[in-house]
Amino acid sequence: MKTLNLLAFDFGASSGRAILGRFDGKKLSIEEIHRFSNDPVKVGGHTYWDVLRLFWEMRQGLLKFAHSVDGELSSLGIDTWGVDFGLLDSSGELLGNPYHYRDSQTEGMMEKAFAVVPKEKIYEYTGIAFQKFNTIYQLLALKERNSPILEKASTLLFMPDLLAYFLTGEKSTEYTEASTSQLLEAHSKTWCTDLIKALGLPDHIFTSIQQPGTIRGNISSHMAEELNIGRVPVIAVATHDTGSAVVAVPAVEDDYVYLSSGTWSLMGVEVKEPIINEQALQWNYTNEGGAENTYRFLKNIMGLWIIQECKRVWDRQGEVYSFAQLEEMARNSEPFKVFIDPDHDDFYAPSNMPQAIQNFCARTGQAVPQTKGEILRCVYESLAMKYRWTIERLEKILNRPLKVLHIVGGGTKDKLLNQFTANAINRPVICGPTEATAIGNLMMQAKALGEVANLREIRQIIKASFPTVDYMPQDVEAWDEAYERFLKVV
């Protein structure tokens, strides 16, 4: 076959990029052709996404392709974070800026929802873990304050669907993204109208659902002419970024657990049917949609957000260090002094993350970390311990062992955390690829174009195309002993 030019637009919570993929039928190579920051905007007490600027950055990526890459563009795909959305009026105009999932509007909304539909019933319907930022609670917040944009809304589009609409004019919802809303019925993979109506939410705003690996439409004629790229097919990839990252896990064994490591840590397994039972509910595991009719049974863990926020605070104070320097500070600090629960609400959106860590340690009767190295060491070790906690409960729910951990995403570059993770879980850790989300996006485009057959073939190609790095457990006895102390804190 001829080499295909594929373009992945991968939007993260703090940055985005356009990644060019060249696929010759056997191997995939990638090249970043455009990168940009993604900066939330705070106005009037609320936090929003600057979606029109994000679309402008997409246009820059397409222009760079047209000006610098030989050959035609075969297709493009878009992935973003989950849950957030834009609302369109009856003429297709965007009603305001989409809210950021860390906006405070959802405070108290879970409790209001449970007063109408019991928590257990919501989980039975959807199989989705309870996070206060889920779409269901964002919509309920708009309803509770009689938001005019909700009253005028004709269509809801999640972030990747909204950006695709700007390109194509086609309105549709991709399945893996929709599943993060906690408004999709787990087994039928359709909108849960009983839940939507019970909460008094408008059911007419939801569109038809597309499975990943299908063609949404083509770039509109006026935009194709303006950008000089032709009417390129826009593919509904696994548009939730974790869904694309899991596509790119280069696993050949069946007894593995994956960790998509970045701002969030998403740890879980791929299953054929949703797991909805009392234990899964108690431990807040989720059943998000995956490619090829799979489910991502996983735990949402706070992740490297805590490190990123520490750095942001210190940067503001004029103490600017690279992530490599911060990692070295942690490496040189005393081990196992104190622990936090990374998923405690204290660390969701504090104004001062280092202070939040110190306050948590004081409140839980531990020594208070003073230096940057002590604070960072606490975070790294606590994350590794939380990964062990998560795997142990996965094994109990599945009733089978999970013998190896595959880490994909930006966190694969964090050597200290990866070694700590191997030590804590006492299992081999295989790291890579780093650009898993973009790679999964690109390979689902190839599938939609008929160039690969299935998920197994995709993973074989990825394994042949990108190197991995292995970490083996060390100092296991010391980590076992420290884990018992961590459990008392959690």
Image (spheres, rainbow, N blue to C red):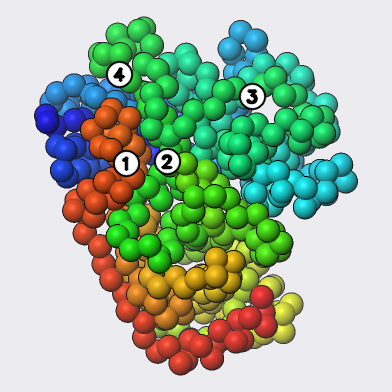
Dot 1 crowding, Cα within 10 Å, few <14, some 14–19, many 20+ = some
Check whether the beta carbons of the residues at disc 1 and disc 2 lie within 8 A of each other.
yes
Mark 1 or 4, closer to the camera: 1
Q: Residue at x 60, y 87 (%)?
A: 484
- Three-letter code for the amino acid on which mark 2 is drawn: Glu
Q: Identify the residue position indicated by label 3 in the image.
A: 206
Q: Alpha carbon of mark 4 to alpha carbon of mark 3: how far?
A: 26 Å
Dot 2 crowding, Cα within 10 Å, few <14, some 14–19, many 20+ = some
- Answer whether residue 132 is visible to the viewer in this image: yes
- Three-letter code for the amino acid on which mark 1 is drawn: Asn
Residue 454, numbered label: 1
Check whether the beta carbons of the residues at disc 3 and disc 1 lie within 8 A of each other.
no
- Three-letter code for the amino acid on which mark 4 is drawn: Val
Q: Alpha carbon of mark 2 to alpha carbon of mark 4: how far?
A: 24 Å
Q: Residue at x 26, y 40 (%)?
A: 32
Q: Position of residue 242 (x, y in %)?
A: 46, 48
- Three-letter code for the amino acid on which mark 3 is drawn: Phe
| Residue 341 lies in quadrant | bottom right
State whether residue 99 is above or below residue 345.
above
Which tag, 3 or 2, sits closer to the chain's start?
3
Which tag, 2 or 4, sits closer to the chain's start?
4
Q: Is 389 left or right of 27, judged from the image as shown?
A: right
Q: Residue at x 46, y 77 (%)?
A: 425
Which tag, 1 or 4, sits closer to the chain's start?
4
Q: Position of residue 278 (x, y in %)?
A: 71, 61
The local secondary structure at tag 2 comes to helix
Q: Position of residue 2 (x, y in %)?
A: 11, 29
Q: Identify the residue position indicated by label 2 in the image.
A: 292
